[in-house]
Amino acid sequence: MPRLAVVALEPNLTVWPTNQLAVREAISLAIDRSSLTSEAESGYVVATTDSSGMTLPTFKAWTSPATGVGKLNLHPDAKAAKAVLEKAGFVMKNGFFYTAAGKELSLTVMDPAAYTDYAQAGAIVAQDLKLAGINASFDGSSITTWTSGLASGAFQLSLMWSQYGATPYSEFNGWLNSSFLSGNGKVATSDYERLNSPTVNAELNKVSMDVTLASQTADLAPIETYVSQNLPIIPVFTRAAYFDYNSTRFVGWPSPSDPTRRWRPEAARIWSFWRCT
């Protein structure tokens, strides 16, 4: 299936403990992206290992080797996740981490039970986090509770897809632009993690005005680096474009080597003839 966008774990950046970078880093290290794609999504999607969250290879033309973007682990690394938390000052006791003051490191992954793939993915994530010392649970909520929770900020961690468009700008803008927040961040129509960075906003605005691929690529680079280093969203797997097609009369459909839809001349002529008749 063509890779349409990226599905990520969105941490609420305004509540504890997901507002802690070390916790987000540990979550990213602890999750089994390979298992999530095979068990929750039946192998129709591909694990995202690019820490910027860029949808690849769909947007490969916009990648820059100078962004400082790293690779995400395909398989869980509970040992590395625990090391990050220990370095941040958390203390292990009875199998779970606590703050120095004795507060347990716990959180809830929330997604709708009706979205059976997301529900299964959320349950797997909770299990993975427990193995890394984070006392996580899964809440299979109603769709109404989930959407209102994202909008109002009544959640800690949730799987959510990115917006999609003709360029990577759409997904980064939807994830990171605080213009989607209102009421002092209490209401969100996107940017559900509630990132509020004037610098990132300015960088997104710059990309929105770029008219060449070269300028878009250059101006996306610091945004990719920011996501990689700060994990305001935690990329997990791609969002597939589910469809069937018939190549008897039309060609140029997406393929693994060419994930963007491109009508070749013969297809355009056929299409034009069909329209005229």
Image: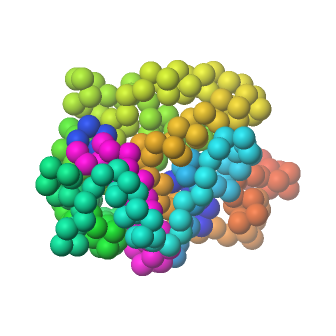
Q: Position of residue 276 (x, y in %)?
A: 74, 46
Q: Is residue 55 visible?
A: no
Asked whether 100 or 144 is in front, the reply is: 100
Name above or below for residue 96 compared with residue 170.
Answer: below
Q: Inspect the magenta stretch and tell me whether residue 225 lies in it.
A: no
Residue at x 65% of width, y 44% of height: 68
Q: Position of residue 3 (x, y in %)?
A: 59, 59
Is residue 39 found left or right of 70 in the rendered image?
left
Residue at x 42% of width, y 70% of height: 79
Residue at x 44% of width, y 35% of height: 176
Q: Is residue 251 visible?
A: yes
**Residue numbers of the magenta segment:** 16-42
Instruction: Specify the quadrant of the image occupied by residue 1.
Output: bottom right
Q: Position of residue 22 (x, y in %)?
A: 37, 50
Instruction: Specify the quadrant of the image occupied by residue 92.
Output: bottom left
Name above or below for residue 272 compared with residue 247.
Answer: above
